[in-house]
């Protein structure tokens, strides 16, 4: 019996897709830049079915690509097109919220739950699941966990990793690890969940998770602040941390290039301040107490910043609508950038203190490749995570004989700068297949060696998401 | 050349202890209950020296026991007495604070730094290193990390694991992994630091760490609250979380048995409330803003709790001295318990919601073994971590033909109850050598199997801290 027939008999006909139109959405990267090849797509409805699929693939020695919402920015969620066609295991049918324990501030969910559905279920119980990102309407929690998703809530609540208490994982050979602990303290040996979080589907298929919930903030204070420089933005961040400690919830920075793109290209967006400034910060305080206390703290810091010459201008949102309008400017950057030209996207993080140096040196490095290119900057400044995006016009891009090579050269130059400052070439997007060479270049040899050892231990046949995350063995790390 | 001579030539004579009186403090468990055998004790002064020691031991195939402040409660930091004498690698001479980056809220430290020294260095810069525990005056950060130390700050700031950004580790073969990242976001492959955190010295020797710092709270509000039951304490916790969200810093519960012991046996300690009550909660709010705001929130919740019949009585600390006095009662439990009798200590955690059921059933289980024994309870209630301590008088303990067997039976019965409620037999103390059998009994076979695989990968000769953490291979997990 062929593997496809076997999978059909295990899951039922309707849960195994083979016709090209049915398969298309699962093998194409969501930005439409990469198309892989699949033996079939399976849609299991339970952990037991995932286990049966993995066993069958393991015995047949056929590669497997686990897939959540397929929103990877690194082409990490689709099968390869240069190797044996893989079985794509989509978790889309596993979307149950299994249990919510209010007193424990935790919930157990299927891996296929969409992030927004989890946020909503938590909010209905007066709780917050704090991970928030652009793709939240379609990305799945399993994918979030497999890639340790970041977003705008990291400053206060940490990455996805910090909000997972337990995991259920099907191993490459089909064994199920039930690690759905719901404990705040558990010192009984190696904490295996951290091995799977961020492993990008290379070590097992995450089928369920216990998530950590937080009190739902009911009061907010939001301001849009103009500052002279990244260093000034950083100094104001220090003032906020000193005064507002635990209620500082977001600290996002964009430059004038980014703001102008959003205002010019996204209908309905307006600059929050009347006069143009070089650098802008969106700050949010949030708490469960009274809003007046937050506004008082916000005003105090703004005055302090103003007196110190750090804050040039600022506007505080006076209504929920205005608060939403400020955030809409921030959330419209991808849409604006897509319309405005060809952005050469990077996703570096450096120590927060090194952000100004990073921006300065990365600008020089990018301009050495593409002189005078406008630089779009949108940063989760509180986390040291800078999306540094040199931009080409559509005409310019088309005029380059090998535009991809130019883009690659720019990205690498920017990543080199981050590395020289103790930073990383991938803060939140992961490695996927587009950054495996950077892994070989920038990670210490002993670290790559340990990762390869663990991969070989869990997946000796190298069947799970092959060609992703780790550099090819023929690519020696430095 | 013998290994000892080799080590002497590598580190110098004064850094290799062999005389029994010199070695004694390093081979005896701090409670004086276990004494191991060492080939020698080495005191390296640098990561390079640790690497040289590990290489030499690896080549000689001699076991190695890394040691921090030797404050393990599970006999995890001393060598065995039933196997080949080990080389004890003490990190005590590596106690430099390497760098502090205020803007990044991080510091890089040697593994041998004492926890209290780190807290102080952070406070001098207006920052908080939030892990706090009884042994902080002598335990070392390397040991904290190797055992993922918990304590009273976990509710707000997480365990040690959550406060480590990067690690420097010497592997069993002497290779050095420089993973001293200082980044808030870094999605570049498996996050190896989490493999070493909590591995109790079985996978490598931690020589340095990058720690995460937080804003130093400058305002505090502390109350001592009497409640009718653990469930009432839990309901009040819910009120605090809803009202105070991010500023709730500690929520500790003790019962009347525990309070009476402290008051009766520790000089200078007084009950904060005039009338006796069955259950007591110590709550702390802390923030960087004004103290009045905290006290207002505290009062509001106490009134809410009182109206709901949950709070029987409460006293709010009105001065720093009174606040310290309340905490001194909490911090005196170990001293009191040691003087009052023989405590059969356990360290379980369950989901927070399951604490009342745990206390009820564990009491039944303990009384089935030792009818009528007083039960001391001291709980980090916000984390679901209950130190459930059936007590025997000194006379009773001496009257038992095999007191250790009775204690073992009681502990195991309590751990069974925790397990049946989705809990753990070791919340914060770790496994060491005293709980390896519980590992075999309570952990899923696939989990033990993965742990053993990782141990074999990193330490194929099984030289690091042998007999600790993992059950003997002859002890099959269920």
Image (cartoon, coloured by chain):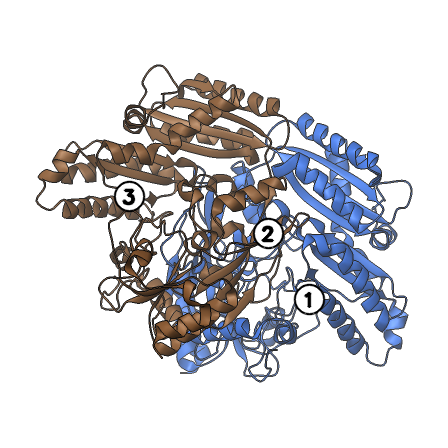
Chain colours: A blue, B brown
- Write down the chain letter for disc 2: B
Label 3: state its secondary structure: loop
Upstream in the sequence, badge 3 or badge 2? 2
- Mark identifier at residue A419: 1
Mark 1 or 2: in front is 2
Q: Label 3 vs label 1: CA separation? A: 46 Å
- Write down the chain letter for disc 1: A
Mark 2, residue position: B107
**What percent of the width, then of the height, locates residue A238?**
71, 42
Mark 3, residue position: B346
**What percent of the width, then of the height, locates residue A24?**
62, 72
Viewport quadrant of the N terminus of chain B: bottom left
Instruction: Judge the density around disc 3: few (<14), some (14-19), many (≥20) Cα neighbours within 10 Å.
Output: many
Q: Do the residues under discs 3 and 1 have CB atoms within 8 angstroms?
A: no
Q: Nearer the viewer, residue A356 or A133?
A: A356
Determine if marks 1 and 2 fall on one subunit: no
Q: Is A311 situated above or below B265?
A: below
What is the quadrant of residue A385 in the picture?
bottom right
Q: Is B3 situated above or below A225?
A: below
Q: Label 3 vs label 2: CA separation? A: 34 Å
**What percent of the width, then of the height, locates residue B184?**
62, 54
Q: Nearer the viewer, residue A398 or A291?
A: A291
Q: Is residue B455 visible?
A: yes
Determine if marks 3 and 2 fall on one subunit: yes
In the displayed image of the protein, which residue is found farthest to the top?
A: B274
- Write down the chain letter for disc 3: B
Label 1: state its secondary structure: helix
């Amino acid at each position: 019996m062929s593997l496809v027939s076997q999978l059909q008999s295990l899951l039922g006909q309707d849960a195994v897709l083979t016709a090209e139109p049915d398969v298309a959405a699962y093998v194409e990267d969501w930005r439409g830049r990469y198309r892989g090849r699949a033996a079939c797509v399976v849609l299991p409805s339970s952990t037991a079915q995932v286990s049966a699929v993995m066993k069958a693939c393991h015995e047949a020695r056929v590669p497997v690509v686990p897939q959540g919402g397929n929103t990877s920015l690194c082409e990490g969620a689709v099968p390869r097109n240069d190797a044996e066609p893989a079985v794509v295991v989509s978790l889309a049918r596993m979307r149950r919220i299994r249990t919510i324990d209010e007193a424990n501030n935790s919930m157990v969910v299927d891996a296929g739950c969409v992030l927004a559905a989890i946020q909503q279920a938590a909010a209905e119980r007066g709780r917050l699941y704090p991970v928030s990102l652009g793709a939240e309407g379609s990305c799945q929690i399993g994918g979030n966990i497999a890639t340790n998703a970041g977003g705008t809530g990291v400053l206060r609540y940490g990455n996805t990793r910090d909000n997972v208490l337990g995991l259920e994982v099907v191993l490459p050979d089909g064994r199920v690890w039930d690690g759905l602990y719901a404990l705040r303290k558990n010192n009984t040996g190696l904490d295996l969940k951290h091995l799977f979080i961020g492993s990008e589907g290379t070590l097992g298929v995450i089928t369920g998770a216990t998530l950590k919930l937080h009190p739902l903030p009911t009061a907010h204070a939001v301001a849009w602040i103009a500052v002279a420089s990244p260093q000034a933005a950083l100094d104001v961040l220090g003032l906020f941390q000193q005064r507002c400690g635990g209620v500082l919830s977001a600290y996002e920075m964009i430059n004038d290039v980014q703001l102008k793109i959003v205002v010019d290209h996204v209908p309905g967006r307006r600059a929050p301040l009347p006069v143009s400034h070089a650098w802008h910060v969106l700050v949010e305080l949030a708490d469960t107490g009274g809003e007046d206390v937050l506004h008082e703290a916000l005003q105090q810091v703004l005055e302090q910043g103003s007196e110190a010459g750090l804050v040039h201008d600022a506007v505080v949102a006076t209504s929920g609508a205005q608060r939403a309008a400020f955030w809409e400017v921030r959330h419209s950057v991808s849409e604006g950038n897509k319309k405005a030209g060809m952005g050469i996207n990077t996703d570096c993080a450096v120590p927060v203190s090194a952000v100004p140096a990073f921006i300065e040196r990365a600008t020089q490095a990018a301009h050495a490749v593409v002189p005078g290119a406008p630089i779009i900057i949108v940063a989760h400044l509180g986390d040291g995570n800078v999306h540094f995006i040199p931009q080409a016009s559509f005409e310019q891009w088309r005029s380059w004989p090998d535009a991809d090579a130019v883009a690659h050269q720019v990205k690498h130059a920017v990543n080199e700068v981050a590395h020289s400052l103790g930073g990383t070439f991938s803060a939140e997007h992961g490695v996927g297949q587009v950054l495996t060479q950077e892994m070989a270049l920038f990670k210490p040899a002993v670290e790559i060696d340990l990762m390869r050892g663990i991969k070989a231990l869990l997946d000796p046949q190298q069947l799970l998401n092959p060609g992703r995350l780790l550099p090819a063995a023929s690519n020696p790390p430095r």
